[in-house]
């Protein structure tokens, strides 16, 4: 056990006290008055100590003989119990997880996620991705319908109106200011466990909040498995997936909808796609997250290309340099970039795609003619591949 970082020793008119500060005050922790033995124990608890270590050191420090050891141990136990009850000391051993009811397992991009929590908490968008229960789970998600007893902090990696990411000693801590039903979440560094602290009742708004928040942990996990998620609408043409990427409001769904309308091209996802490499072959994996489009698919398809959309008054295709392709594709990724290492991984993945797919920028209107302009460019690319 060791002392909490949210408490300090101070003397008030010569009397020693342990008082909270910072997060300890925010968590409404109480201060306590201690004696000189307590002061000595507090100093020992700078380091991780067992009860036996504390008894041994106190016996030596206060010159207690063997006859006094049982009473000394009892006094130390009582003192430690008081400190633990007030959250003034922390156990060095991880507390066992409280059991959380199993809901189902889902498979996304070859990764198995196990959802645990009340059935009413989870979105129906997960249902098409459900699989039979297995032992090989990549990420366990626990939904707790309460707020955490303690609120650890860490180094702030990212802060916005929608999300705060902090890096603690052993885990990541997430706050979701814009999601009123999600208090916070914590995730192990390897992404194998993510715990959400939530505020019922299980309304549509609750399920939407949780559905969106779970995506964050999955994107972290998929990045660790050498995949990247790209903000784009996708469709199937000539046996390959074609992604149309652009900032929100540019017209991704409008453009892919025109393909479906005039060429009957099946739509894969209206907002987000997961990219992976199988050897030297890029693939697109279906995702349950699809923005407001409602269009998602569980399948996997070879990736044909990524078309970067830009609104214009006339339709034309712009060729891009290799550095532009890599940079612009990477900028459409929504995989984590909380650290330099993560951003380097995103840039590297975008670079791996370049030799294997068609990438261009389409300046386009919202008219059907835009479909035929880019279709001609895609067909020409496919013909060149056959010739080569």
Image (cartoon, grey):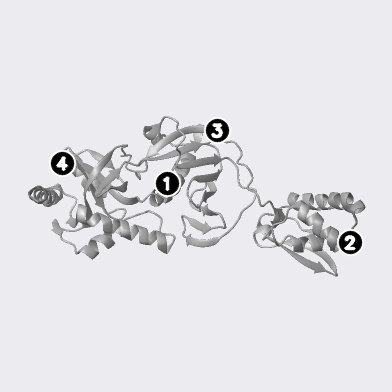
Neighbours of disc 3 within 10 Å: few (<14), some (14-19), many (20+): few
Name the residue beneath numbered marker 3. Answer: 101
Q: What residue lies at 41% left-to-right and 61% top-to-bottom?
A: 341
| Number of marks present in the image shown | 4
Task: Using the rendered image of the protein, determine whether residue 368 is visible from the camera's viewpoint.
Answer: yes
Residue 339 position by quadrant: bottom left
Please tell me which of labels 2 and 1 falls first in the chain: 2
Relative side of 33 to 362, left or right: right
Please tell me which of labels 4 and 3 falls first in the chain: 3
- The percent position of residue 272, horizontal first and vertical second, equals 32, 47
Query: Could you say whether the residue bearing mark 3 is in a helix, strand or loop?
Result: loop
Q: Are marks 3 and 1 in contact (CB under 8 Å)?
A: no
Task: Give the number of the mark in front: 3 or 2.
Answer: 2
Mark 4 and mark 1: span between their CA atoms?
30 Å
Q: Are marks 3 and 2 in contact (CB under 8 Å)?
A: no
Mark 3 and mark 1: span between their CA atoms?
20 Å
Mark 3 and mark 2: span between their CA atoms?
52 Å
- Which label was assigned to residue 367? none
122 up-or-down from 227: above or below: above
Name the residue beneath numbered marker 2. Answer: 63
Taking the view exactly as shown, the residue that stands out farthest to the left is 387
Neighbours of disc 2 within 10 Å: few (<14), some (14-19), many (20+): few
Residue 348 position by quadrant: bottom left
Name the residue beneath numbered marker 4. Answer: 238
Neighbours of disc 4 within 10 Å: few (<14), some (14-19), many (20+): few
Q: Are marks 2 and 1 in contact (CB under 8 Å)?
A: no
Name the residue beneath numbered marker 1. Answer: 218
Neighbours of disc 1 within 10 Å: few (<14), some (14-19), many (20+): many
Task: Give the number of the mark in front: 2 or 1.
Answer: 2
């Amino acid at each position: 056990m060791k002392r909490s970082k949210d408490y300090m020793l101070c003397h008030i008119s010569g009397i020693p006290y342990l008082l909270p500060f910072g997060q300890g005050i925010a968590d409404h922790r109480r201060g306590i008055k201690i004696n000189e033995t307590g002061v000595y124990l507090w100093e020992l608890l700078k380091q991780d100590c067992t009860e036996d270590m504390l008894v041994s050191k106190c016996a030596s420090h206060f010159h207690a003989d063997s006859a006094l050891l049982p009473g000394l141990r009892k006094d130390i136990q009582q003192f430690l119990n008081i400190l633990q009850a007030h959250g003034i000391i922390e156990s060095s051993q991880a507390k066992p997880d409280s059991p959380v009811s199993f809901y189902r397992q889902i498979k996304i991009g070859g990764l198995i996620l196990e959802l645990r929590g009340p059935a009413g908490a989870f979105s129906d968008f997960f249902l098409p991705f459900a699989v039979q229960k297995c032992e090989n789970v990549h990420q366990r998600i626990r939904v707790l319908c309460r707020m955490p007893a303690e609120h650890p902090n860490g180094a702030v990696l990212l802060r916005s109106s929608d999300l705060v990411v902090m890096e603690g000693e052993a885990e990541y801590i997430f706050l979701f200011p814009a999601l009123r039903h999600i208090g916070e979440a914590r995730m192990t560094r390897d992404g194998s466990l993510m715990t959400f602290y939530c505020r019922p009742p299980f309304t549509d708004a609750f399920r939407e909040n949780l559905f969106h928040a779970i995506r964050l942990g999955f994107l972290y996990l998929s990045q660790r498995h050498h995949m990247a998620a790209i903000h784009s609408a996708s469709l199937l043409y000539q046996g390959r997936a074609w992604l149309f990427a652009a900032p929100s409001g540019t017209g991704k769904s409008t453009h892919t909808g025109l393909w479906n309308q005039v060429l009957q091209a099946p739509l894969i996802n209206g907002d987000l796609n997961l990219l992976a490499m199988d050897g030297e072959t890029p693939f697109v994996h279906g995702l349950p997250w699809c923005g407001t489009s409602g269009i998602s698919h569980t399948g996997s398809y070879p990736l044909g290309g990524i078309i970067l959309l830009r609104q214009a008054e006339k339709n034309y295709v712009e060729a891009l340099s290799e550095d532009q392709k890599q940079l612009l594709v990477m900028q459409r990724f929504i995989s984590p970039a909380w650290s330099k290492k993560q951003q380097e991984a995103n840039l590297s993945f975008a670079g791996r795609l370049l030799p294997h797919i068609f990438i261009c920028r389409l300046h386009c209107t919202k008219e059907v003619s835009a479909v035929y302009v880019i279709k001609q460019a895609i067909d020409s690319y496919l013909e060149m591949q056959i010739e080569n």
